[in-house]
Image (cartoon, rainbow, N blue to C red):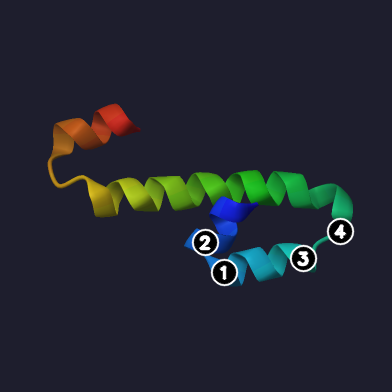
Amino acid sequence: MGAVRAADHDRYLSVLYAPADKRGALLALYAFNAEIAGVRDRIHEPLPGEVRL
């Protein structure tokens, strides 16, 4: 939950409005999205980026 809050505050807030039984799945999806977006920002060469994924 903290990773999503730090990486994408708007999506974190949207999860709070989702039904309680769906929040875990949404947080997992949004955390995955944040990690993929972070790889693009941290890695500048293709091979290390592919390894990171």
- Sequence-earlier tag: 3 or 2: 2
Question: Residue 20 at what x, y percent from top left?
Answer: 87, 54
Mark 4, residue position = 19
Mark 3, residue position = 16
- Sequence-earlier tag: 2 or 4: 2
Mark 2, residue position = 6
Near-viewer residue (42 or 25)? 42
Q: In terms of secondary structure, where does tag 2 sit? A: helix
Q: Residue at x 69, y 69 (%)?
A: 14
Please state which amino acid type lies under the numbered disc 1. Answer: His
Please state which amino acid type lies under the numbered disc 3. Answer: Leu
- Sequence-earlier tag: 3 or 1: 1
C-alpha gap between disc 2 and disc 4 = 21 Å
Q: Is residue 30 left or right of residue 37?
A: right
Against 21, residue 10 (above or below) is below
Q: In terms of secondary structure, where does tag 4 sit? A: loop
Mark 1, residue position = 9
Please state which amino acid type lies under the numbered disc 4. Answer: Pro
Q: Are marks 4 and 1 in contact (CB under 8 Å)?
A: no
User: In this rendering, which labeled residue sits more in front, label 4 or label 1?
Assistant: 1
Q: Residue at x 86, y 58 (%)?
A: 19
